[in-house]
Image: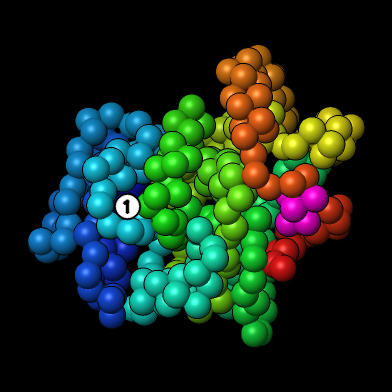
Amino acid sequence: MIVNYNGGTDLARCLAALLAQSFRDFEAVIVDNGSIDGSLEGLPHDPRLTILRTGKNLGFAAGNNQAAAGASAPWLVMLNPDAFPASDWLELLLDEATVHGEYAAFGSTQVMSADPSRADGLGDCFSPYGFAWRGGCRKPLPVPVPAGESFAACAAAMMIRRDWFERLGGFDERFFCYGEDVDLCFRLRLAGGRVWQSNRARVEHVGGATSGGAHSVFSLYHGYRNQIWLIAKNMPGPILAVTLLTYLPLLLLRCLLLKKPSAIWVVLKASFDGVKGLAPFWSDRRKLQAERKASTLAIARVLSWSPMALLQRRAKLL
């Protein structure tokens, strides 16, 4: 499942790497969200590829949900158009699922496309203080690369059991873009599922290629707004008390670190809009928490409690 929005030449490179996979029994659905940059021109012709043109930008969450609609394969795999998988990527992800059959979702080792000696993400982390990050992002790639249970899998290169995806209702389309993968995995955890981070299945990832980068207005706004919704929906009550005490001071610290007044304004507006739009997510929370199968202790165990881990964007794997 590849959601494309003005992916440029990255999309062709992504598809070339996908079609070169050692595991060949797959169907790839490219959902194009109204691209106007010519990124759909000159793509390879292969019966495994299907292109869905939405005619407008539905966002990452809704685009993936459209790609998944009607799927019958046992596995759904998300791949960003700016992510370039190694030739054995799919084969190794499926092997991880065989070895670790008790897990419902699997994350890939992501390295920076511009510098593969640095990590782009070694599993998504979430702190009880309310902040998510890609573990080890932009840090030197550790040797050996770690593997283990992570809080969430980054949807730039993620595999999930289709029955779990459907049971969870897919991605929350209200998020549009950013944080929807952490939200999906949080809901999976509340329902009793677990996430495995592979150190073998690898992709090179540009990151932010269609959204302007981590500090663009788009990224900052959707990231901080969606973070509030994610917390409100999913965080178990006893841990939510910690979040409420720590989130605002850390948010203000984050604003100070941004330094640029324009960026600070975007973060504050996003946070205000997040709080303003809380009502439906708080309503969802009541159902999620009433039906959850995971204990508060099980959720606390996979959160990143160290403030230094948050500040240094460390990976956490169990």
- Frontmost residue, 162 versus 113: 162
Q: Residue at x 70, y 67 (%)?
A: 317
For the stretch drawn in magenta, what is the main secondary structure? helix
Q: Position of residue 309 (x, y in %)?
A: 80, 59
Q: Is residue 82 magenta?
A: no
Magenta span of residues: 297-303
Return the x and y of residue 170 as percentages of the image width and height: 43, 40
Residue drawn at x 18%, y 47% as measured from the top left: 51
Residue 186 appears left or right of 70:
right
Task: Compare residues 273 and 41 and report the one nearer the observer.
Answer: 273
Return the x and y of residue 207 as percentages of the image width and height: 49, 55
Near mark 1 (Cα within 10 A), the count class, few <14, some 14-19 or many ≥20, is many
Q: Which residue is mark 1?
A: 1
Residue 106 in sight from this viewpoint: yes
Mark 1: which secondary structure? loop
Q: Residue at x 49, y 49 (%)?
A: 208
Q: Is residue 218 above or below residue 97?
A: above
Q: How is the image coloured?
A: rainbow
Q: Amino acid at mark 1?
A: Met
Image quadrant containing the C terminus = bottom right
Nearer the observer, 16 or 161: 161
Q: Write the residue at 33% across / 31% down.
A: 57
